[in-house]
Image: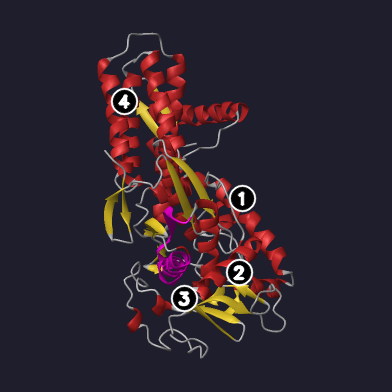
Amino acid sequence: MPLRVFNTLGRKTEDFVPLNPPRVGMYVCGPTVYGHSHLGHAKSYVSFDAILRWLRFSGFEVNYVQNITDVGHLTDDADEGEDKIIAEARRRGLHPMAVVELFMRSYFDDMDALNILRPDISPRASGHIPEQIECVRKLLEKGCAYEVNGSVYFDVQSFSKYGRLSGRDVSELEAGARVEVNQEKKHPADFALWKRAEPGHIMRWPSPWGEGFPGWHLECSVMSQKYIGETLDIHGGGIENQFPHHECEIAQGECATGKQFCRYWLHNNMVTLNGQKMGKSLGNAISLKQLFYEGHPLLEKTFEPVVIRHFILTSHYRAPLDFSNEALRGAESGSYKLRDAARELSQAAAAAPAKPRADAIRAALEQTEKSFAEAMNEDFNTAAAIATVFEFARQTGTWIREGAGREDLTAADLLMRRLTQDALGLKWPETPAAAQSRLNDVMQILVDLRNEARRNKNFQLSDQIRARLTALGIELRDLPEGTKWTGL
């Protein structure tokens, strides 16, 4: 079946047809690097990593661009307030670019931990000032912008399509509805392309309109078109950026070139806590470093990055993801079960005897691959794709117990790796052989003690051992061939 995506621009699911197949130009809004990445960032970038992986898995040649915003993102999206990076720099007593370097490195460390593929290009806004100035010049020449006291604003009334992406009506955007009225603007919805730098403003560059800095919205339009072309195939980002950020990108990009800025707009939903968005500005964010290593008051424990990735992929990228310790524990249990099934399959394939291929297993492998593809081709439904993998893991366990041959199990192992690691990016840390051997010995002692307690009818001790292991995420299974354990 063809790949179908939900295009926010038309608010409907459409067949995905890139401009120049098999090449795909994909741009995703990157972070503003003034703090450590949090769970909300993970939701966005894991979601778009799954999209990227599936596009490449399906044979598309993707040029993936994701920016780093290191200047111009003000504390209010309506061109007011202070630059977020400068505010953090002052709080820390650092130069703004030192803050940028600190949190940019932190961001990539966290994304690497989540097994998120690095972008092909990661342009920084401060490194593209000449291109942004040139874009402003074009917009002024075309009558789509105006200059006031060293600042340049986009005239939204010059672009009849403004509001199409978000469904906003420009005439309904009343002055003072969101912030105090900026008297420099002709219309309250007009937005800054270039802001004059007030005295003492550190991040500033010379321009035809005086020293200043670029507007946040302008940066993404210029950098995406520089590295992908005048028309993008895919533009991704969080649903909270749909307005005004993405709306403004369209206006700038299309007025500057006269061409469609982007063909498919994909927006991920947010992480919520009790129905409220999680975010740094709301004071309820959990940084990924707290989630992985340090702990947080909202957390019962820390979780491996692969568990967080699993947690995110069990929801659709367009659906909100509600945080709870119970949900994280469920994701942890599910991730470990899948890991154990994958490891058991690899070990069984290596040890299985040679036998003729079984038609039933061959058909099951084909059906699994088909079901997985159908899920991902329907707007990247990772939740349904993971459900398919779990059913496949159940089948492989049956084949192992029934004594399937080496060739069948090897084919199953290869498919399991392709679906879990290549397509979904679920890469579990390898346990060192020596540590694994010691762990097996320790677990065997506990299993032997429990079995001895059961033989002596000391069920209280037997149940206590099992319950305490269960609390640690370790499951004991009493099978005809003996007690087996999973979970580490």
Residue on which the image places disc 2: 133
- Residue on which the image places disc 3: 144
Q: From the viewer's perspective, is the residue at label 2 or at label 1 nearer?
A: 2
Q: Earlier in the sequence, mark 4 or mark 1?
A: 1
Residues under labels 4 and 2: Cα distance? 55 Å
Residue at screen point 58% across, 81% down: 151
Element on which disc 2 rests:
helix
- Give residue 31's position: percent from left, percent from top: 55, 61
217 relative position to 433: left or right: left
Q: Which residues are magenta?
A: 230-256
Which residue does the numbered mark 4 point to in the structure image?
365
Q: Is residue 412 visible?
A: yes
The crowd level at tag 1 (other Cα within 10 Å; few <14, some 14-19, many 20+) is some
Disc 4 marks a residue whose amino acid type is Leu
Image height of 201 relative to 278, above or below: below
Which picture quadrant has residue 462?
Answer: top left
Q: Which residue is mark 1?
A: 109
Nearest the viewer among 327 and 30 is 30
Q: CA distance from mark 4 to mark 3?
A: 57 Å
